[in-house]
Amino acid sequence: MKKEYQTFVRQFKDLKEGTQKLFIKDLTPGPRKYDTKYVRAEISFNPEKIKDGDILRIRSESGALLPQPWGIKILEELSESVPGKPWEDVYKAMKKS
Amino acid sequence: MPVALVIGTDPIAHMVATAPFRLEEDEAKFAGALRKEPIELVKCETCDLLVPAHSEIVIEGEILTDQIVPDGPFGEYPGYRSGTMAEGVGFRVKAITYRNNPILTIIALGVPIDDSSIAAALTAGMAMKRGLNHRGVPVIDVYVPPEGVTHLIYVSVKKGGTEVAKEVLDFFTARRVMVSKVIVLDEDIDVFDSGQVLHAFATKCHPGRGIVVEHYEGRANSLTPCYSPKERERLKGASVAFDATWPPEWLPEIIPVKASFKTIYSKEIQEKVIQNWKSYGFK
């Protein structure tokens, strides 16, 4: 049984195939549903291209769900947090103005 | 930095927690004043922070200032699923204390009216009125209609006009901008009555010269649904003030008189009609 994960992008075109580092949420029903993981994973728009892969559902910034899910194979689970300044994305946008 | 998250306490304390306060101000005292009884506080188990004693659950821990943890996205208060995973704040839990069989209270944000929009109507409106007063705007009252999800605000002022509308807009756009539309009204309009506000907006806001717009970048609210992906990324946006007040330079003789029961009938006729109301067959 394939597991299902979800990730979020601003626009669907932002997601690239191949080996990527991305945050995913585990959609497996149960108390750990939506558990967030930071992973290095191989992803493809064609789930059949990824041997022993799982399902990756993708939502845009506006909440729209991509009708066709991608395939994902987690290669490595990374640290649940990454070094940096919280809300750095907001501060960067503010500095640019 | 130590932090304590309080889940399920006195409803007034939760309500007050949604209001903006300065660092030196004491929210617990304010909540106590509103409920006319002090909020009993106890010290946390792992730090000196004080929390309401009768909370259902308290989660103690520390904020990680040098780590990013993905945050969201959620169904958000504007009423849409919007936003990406943001570079959020990490919180390391050190202790969880709770009552026996605790109740986990939650908020389900979304299309208004919900908990958030009602809380904002009470507490954000109060803070905005205080801020406008502090800035010298001749404010009478402020209402944050729940359906407007803090994007739309009604402000009534003692003296209106374009300059005052600009001052009001300046207040709302000075820092990070959470408000995109403000209707500025004369003091005779009850801002808590959306019917009166819409009537004033429809009839008194000049479509050409009654609209003041300010554009900005780097401080817009990215959860504004009408912004494009590019605008959200750059925190680029605009706010508008709709001036629904009579121009202050107009002489009283050219200000249209309202055709209402209270304005066009004599006091004697008004009293007579009110006295005889039931005899007309009305309830």
Image (tube, coloured by chain):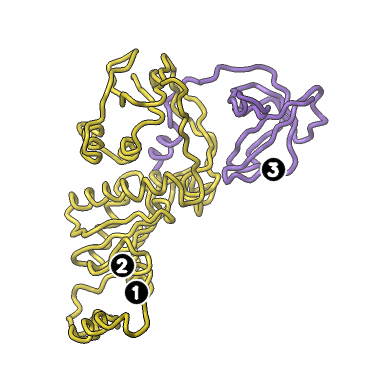
Chain colours: A purple, B yellow
On the image, numbered disc 3 is attached to which residue? A66
Mark 3 Cα within 10 Å, few/some/many (few <14, many 20+)?
few
On the image, numbered disc 1 is attached to which residue? B206
Give the answer, above or below, for where B222 lies relative to B28: below
What is the chain identity of the residue bearing mark 2? B
Give the left or right position of residue A5, taking residue B5 as reference: right
CA separation in Å, label 3 and label 1: 44 Å
At which x and y percent is residue B281?
37, 83
At which x and y percent is residue B235?
44, 45
CA separation in Å, label 1 and label 2: 8 Å
State if disc 2 and disc 1 touch (CB < 8 Å). Answer: yes
What is the chain identity of the residue bearing mark 1? B
At which x and y percent is residue B20?
29, 40
Q: Quadrant of the C terminus of chain B?
A: bottom left
Could you say which is closer to the camera, residue B202 or residue B231? B202
On the image, numbered disc 2 is attached to which residue? B243
Looking at the image, which residue is at 47% across and 38% down? B107
Q: Which mark is residue B227?
A: none
